[in-house]
Image: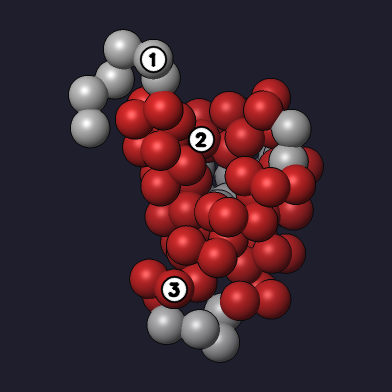
Amino acid sequence: MSSLVTPEARMGNDIARQFGHLPADEAADTIARHIETFWDPAMRRTLEGLAAAHDDTLDPLVADAAGRLAAHATRSEPDAQP
């Protein structure tokens, strides 16, 4: 495990613990919605980058949620195709 846990990873992991009782797919969706609603774009981009780099400090639910956020962001770009 990496010796440095970024604030985004720590906060994301804290959120994941709150929703860990849900089925994994539902938990990842709920975590993604929470992050999209309450985190600023720079924090979301940092988390998405950690997930893309397979950072081992991320809870698997957070990594899944970050992937969903990144996919949503890509689809939301003006030139993106559905």
What is the spatial separation of the Cα atoms under label 2 and label 3, in whole angstroms? Answer: 19 Å
Q: Residue 78 has which mark?
A: 1
Q: Amino acid at mark 2?
A: Glu
Q: Looking at the picture, how far across and down is residue 76, in whole percent?
A: 41, 28
* Amino acid type, callout 3: Glu
Helix, strand or loop at disc 2? helix
Q: Secondary structure at mark 1?
A: loop
Residue 26 disc label: 3
Q: CA distance from mark 3 to mark 1?
A: 28 Å
Side (left or right) of 51 relative to 74? right
Classify 64 as above or below 79. Answer: below
Q: Earlier in the sequence, mark 3 or mark 1?
A: 3
* x and y, in percent, of residue 69 in the image: 47, 42
Q: Nearer the viewer, mark 2 or mark 1?
A: 1
Residue at figure coordinates x 69%, y 25% from the top left: 42
Residue at the spot of label 2:
48
What residue is shown at x 29% (from left), y 20% (from top)? 80
Which amino acid, by three-letter code, is at mark 1? Pro
Could you tell me residue 44's position as x and y percent?
62, 35
For the residue labelled by badge 3, is the local secondary structure a helix, a strand or a loop?
Answer: helix
- Horizontal side of 78 relative to 14 (left or right) equals left
- Nearer to us: label 3 or label 1: 1
